[in-house]
Amino acid sequence: MADAKEIARKNGIVGAGGAAFPTHIKLSGKAEILIANGAECEPLLYKDETVLHHFFDDFIKGLLLAKESVSAKKCIIGIKEKHKDLIEEIRQKIPKDVTICQLKDTYPSGDEFLLVYDATGRLIPKGGIPLDVGVVVQNVETLYNIGINKPVIEKFITVSGDVDEAVTLKVPIGIEWAQILKHLKIKTENKKFIIGGPMMGFVSDDLTMPVTKGDSGIVVLPENHPLIYKKSRTKQNIEKIAYTCDQCMRCSDLCPRDLLGHGVKPHKAMISVSMNLKEKIPYQASSLYCCECSLCTLYACPEDLDPSKVMILSRRALFEKGFRPKKEFIEINPMYHYRRTPTKLLVRRLGLEEFIKPHKFLDIKIDPQKIVLKLNQHRGEPSKPIVKKGQYVERGELVAETEEGKMGSRIFSSISGIVKVVDKEKIIVETK
């Protein structure tokens, strides 16, 4: 049987759920349980559901290969219980040693710390990883990529929001977002765009940005939508409004990592804004364990403040001072099952109810004349180009390699053409 770890290394496979962690490294350990993450907790994204529905055979092949690679005794597919038809569909196809964990429709159920606890009852230690409790988690698209055993040159992405119809499609890695929207005949006038999901994604007006291995989709919204405003705040504005925090603690009460017992306290980080550098540290400390789900900002805070960004800025400051998370075994918060955030209420709070609409898989091919392959589209060290300007490359040809002993991922050209640019950040290939 083919080795999933070698398949992942050879083909440049990374976590397709957003983290973009090199999969061959994640499969290097041994675990009792392998979990396929199909929770897809972000509203308005449907790529994982699409993979399970339309490409199940390739997915299950990758799942079983990964199971063999990590010597797991059990496989679990995590999927929200609301997908009743899909669950029944795949239940008829899965092997006996694979089970389905039906997850509550809460946010962020796809966070692997929550997923591991919900699916196995095992509590990942604070500052730890799933392997600490004998578990490996892989996104369903990642497992699909293992199953097809080909260079990663395409990505499943969802286009949703203020569009006539939400669609998921496969696109060449390196294609500009603008070209995808143009191909789908989506109007961009008076619109703003969130790359990724509405919670953890970021606002960008630059649609010349290329699609990377870690992208999941793009949400199109009216330019005056409140969510666009909230996600576009500057560091100065974030810190300025933080002074008005009245310490109601709702952000900490609803924090999913705090509910796991990790002691994440956004309300304390909010206090730190008014302190001097030395005083800040104890109040910023819990930011080291934040998962950046943005629930504290976009759902919990009743005053429209931005504790999530304050946590991110706090963690960045602590890292610059040399602080790192410490592994510590903890106990679950007794309110864990009672303070989970229903996705339906989250969508309402975000003002996205009108954009929840039927979606479909669009089986089309887009052939860009130019692609921009970023060299740092994964966790770890940027890949090193192995091609030169003026060189002709074939679709699927290796163009950037990971240095021996460094954490990274290989990069392949998603079109045939001439290498026009090679620098420390990117490789540009054009057909003409």
Image (spheres, grey):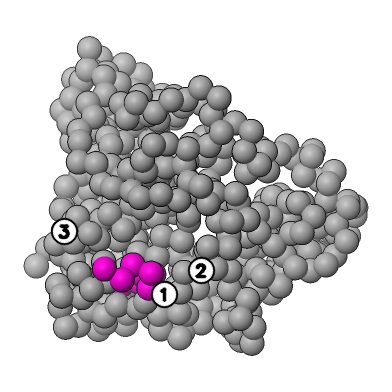
Name the element at disc 3.
helix
Out of 7 and 205, give the one closest to the viewer: 205
Q: Quadrant of the C terminus?
A: top left
Do callouts 2 and 1 mark residues in contact (Cβ within 8 Å)?
Answer: yes
- Residue position marked by numbered label 1 in the rendering: 103
Residue 342 in the figure: left or right of residue 375? right
- What is the spatial separation of the Cα atoms under label 3 and label 1, in whole angstroms? 23 Å
| Camera-side mark, 2 or 3 | 2
How crowded pointer 1 is (Cα within 10 Å; few <14, some 14-19, many 20+) is rated as many
The label on residue 106 is: 2
Out of 369 and 136, give the one closest to the viewer: 369
Q: Is residue 217 magenta?
A: no
Residue 134, horizontal then vertical, whole percent: 38, 80
The label on residue 58 is: 3
Q: How many marks?
A: 3
Residue 352 in the figure: left or right of residue 289? left
Out of 278 and 232, give the one closest to the viewer: 232
For badge 3, the amino acid type reads Asp
